[in-house]
Amino acid sequence: MARPWRIEFEGALYHILSRGNQGQDIFLSDADRHLFLDTLGEMADRYGIDLYTYVLMGNHYHLLLKTHHANLSKAMQWFGTAYARRFNIGHNRSGHLFQGRFKSFIVQNDAYLTQLSCYIHRNPLRAGIVQRLADYPWSSYPVYAYRKKAPKWLKTSLILSRYSTKNPHQAYRRKVQNYAGEEQSLFEDLRYGLFLGTKSFADTLKKRFVKTSPQSELPQQVKLSKDVDAATTIKKLAQALNCRVDHFRDSLRISKTDKMNRDLMLYLLWHSGLYTNRQIGELFGLSYSSVSSRAAIARKSIREDVTLQKKVQQLNDLINV
């Protein structure tokens, strides 16, 4: 399978996401989480990277970072290999730990830095792991919100400096607590499946880095040549699953099989990171909030069913995830 294309330049700000292979957990103990953070610090030091926020979930993680050199791929390749090797040795296992290559989104620094940090920190709440973020120790949120001791490699001043108050930690805490209503709109500004920012920001980088007539086999470059149409993608998936999309909106006609296919398609679109919850909800006649819950249910079913896992791998090729 062709590799996802990367845009790399000095001073680039990225949102990084990586998941466990076939949805498996990438942490089996707190010792693994400490190992992960130690390895993350090594990467920052070795490759000249500023790490701003992080959250460790069961089967995936999020990072917000900046590269001082155009070396994101090298840094993340080293990190993924180093952690997986150390994890495997510690658990006497072998094989892949992560699901393919990591996903990266280029972030417009000024307007989106704080918003994205709030989104990343709220992951444990959205997943229903905790009722209060203060109870979740495996993210950088306690450092920002409660002045907890930070790893030496964590850079907090850039985000906290945006609060011109005597207590920026309290101000940030309130921002995160009140951010639920803004989450819905953040990824409306995800453009071409790669840039999080204004249209002018995305178009400037697209013009600078993307060829107008892609000739390589790199799938992400092809996606950048035109906007990704979710409706077209759904038609492809429906044909592959031999189902009718119009049945999904009809509560009287929708069958158990239709519901399963709907949730599988919904999960694939959600997991790709190319579409917002609002876009997905409109296509299936669902509310924004129900998209995340349906995706979570589908993910659980996929993790427990080998046949579904194989089907997901086949369908992923249709949307070049």
Image (cartoon, rainbow, N blue to C red):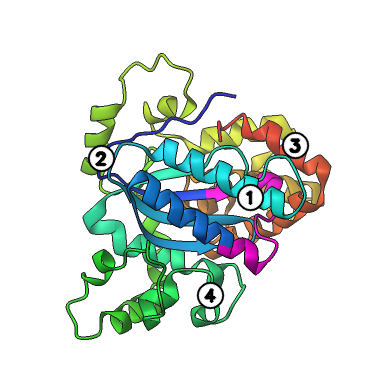
Sequence-wise first label, 1 or 3: 1
In space, the residues marked 4 and 1 are separated at their CA atoms by 22 Å
Q: Which mark is residue 311?
A: 3
Looking at the rendered image, the disc whose residue lies closer to the viewer, 3 or 4, is 4
Amino acid on which disc 3 is placed = Lys
Q: Residue at x 27, y 50 (%)?
A: 108
The magenta stretch is: 18-34
Q: Quadrant of residue 290?
A: bottom right
Picture coordinates of residue 187, whole percent (x, y): 40, 53
Q: Which mark is residue 86?
A: 1
Q: Which mark is residue 137?
A: 4
In space, the residues marked 1 and 3 are separated at their CA atoms by 31 Å
Q: In front here: 79 or 25? A: 79
Q: Which mark is residue 10?
A: 2
Does residue 109 appear to the left or right of 281 in the view shown?
left
Looking at the rendered image, the disc whose residue lies closer to the viewer, 3 or 2, is 2
The furthest residue to the top? 215
Sequence-wise first label, 4 or 1: 1
Residue 27 magenta = yes
In space, the residues marked 2 and 1 are separated at their CA atoms by 30 Å
